[in-house]
């Protein structure tokens, strides 16, 4: 919403929030209602709990009421969001989920922007429409996407993750990280298991896919250049891994959110 929610008077009813911003780097904040954020164009990053989520175009994130969240974006972003009054829908069975938005859900979210924070309370047509959106999005959120990276506590693992993110185009693995950071492979492996609950290789693979998604969403570089930038030696290997991760090819992914 562009401001600390603690400084705003937020009504206890559901309303839409339409934003068009050159960039975004909001502080941590809590919303008193369940917050549905839909990324129309470009990509957001969401920090929620111990995870950092990528919210690429044509995806939505649903964050439960009172959960601390930080939203940021490096470039111009357009979004349509809905803040559900806490009592307007049942409590969400999760803290945060990112899910793919169908054409129906997208049109419903965009249409709902007609009812902003200044709407008339008690408008039954608006309440019914927002309830319908909640039902559709709950069904979609039942099949969440895994577009997240873990956030860690220890200094050593923070250094390792920072090094990975800065060198995705280079050969990476436990041995390379151990040599670069002067940490034993055994210690590094143990800390990955304890703090991220995934292996070093799984983290690297996921980080490469998320960076590729971000580049495809925000840059005009050819797919082959994206593949090399995130560490793949062949386009076929990149296409195979990208499709396995997102359920679509890089070209399909890019075309789906291209300006209409």
Image (spheres, grey):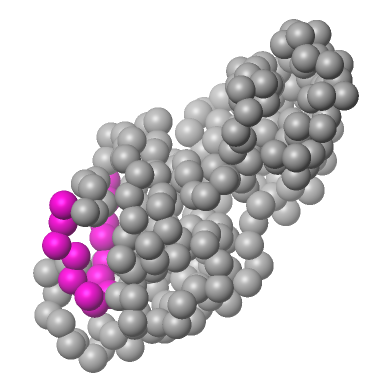
Left/right placement of residue 16 relative to residue 260 reads: left
- Name the residue at 39% across, 44% down: 71
Whether residue 9 is in magenta: the answer is yes
Residue 217 x, y percent position in the rendering: 52, 38
Is 24 above or below relative to 14?
above
Kindly tell me whether residue 154 is visible in this rendering. Answer: yes
Front residue of 68 and 112: 68
Q: Which residues are magenta?
A: 7-20
User: Quick one: which residue is furthest to the bottom in this view?
Assistant: 124
- Name the residue at 61% across, 45% down: 148
Residue 131 x, y percent position in the rendering: 38, 83
Residue 35 x, y percent position in the rendering: 38, 63
Is 163 above or below relative to 61?
above
Left/right placement of residue 4 relative to residue 153 reads: left
Residue 110 falls in which quadrant of the image?
A: bottom left
Residue 34 x, y percent position in the rendering: 39, 68
Kindly tell me whether residue 234 is visible in this rendering. Answer: no
């Amino acid at each position: 919403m562009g401001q600390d929610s603690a400084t705003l008077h937020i009504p206890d009813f559901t309303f839409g929030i339409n934003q068009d911003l050159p960039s975004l780097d909001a502080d941590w904040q809590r919303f008193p209602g369940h917050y549905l954020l839909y990324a129309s164009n470009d990509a957001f990053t969401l920090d929620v709990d111990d995870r950092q989520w990528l919210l690429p175009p044509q995806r939505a994130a649903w964050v439960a009421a009172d959960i601390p969240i930080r939203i940021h974006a490096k470039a111009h972003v357009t979004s349509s969001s809905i803040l559900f009054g806490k009592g307007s829908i049942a409590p969400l069975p999760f803290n945060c989920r990112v899910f793919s938005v169908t054409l129906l859900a997208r049109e419903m979210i965009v249409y709902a922007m007609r009812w902003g924070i200044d709407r008339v309370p008690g408008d039954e047509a608006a309440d019914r429409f927002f309830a319908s959106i909640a039902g559709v999005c709950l069904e979609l959120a039942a099949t969440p996407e895994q577009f997240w990276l873990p956030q860690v506590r220890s200094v050593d693992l923070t250094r390792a993750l920072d090094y990975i993110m800065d060198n995705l185009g280079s050969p990476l693995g436990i041995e390379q990280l151990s040599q670069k950071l002067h940490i034993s492979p055994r210690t590094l492996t143990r800390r990955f298991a304890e703090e991220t609950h995934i292996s070093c290789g799984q983290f690297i693979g996921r980080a490469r896919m998320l960076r590729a998604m971000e580049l495809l969403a925000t840059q005009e570089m050819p797919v082959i250049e994206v593949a090399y930038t995130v560490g793949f030696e062949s386009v076929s290997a990149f296409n195979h891994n990208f499709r396995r991760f997102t359920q679509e090819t890089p070209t399909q992914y890019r075309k789906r959110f291209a300006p209409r």
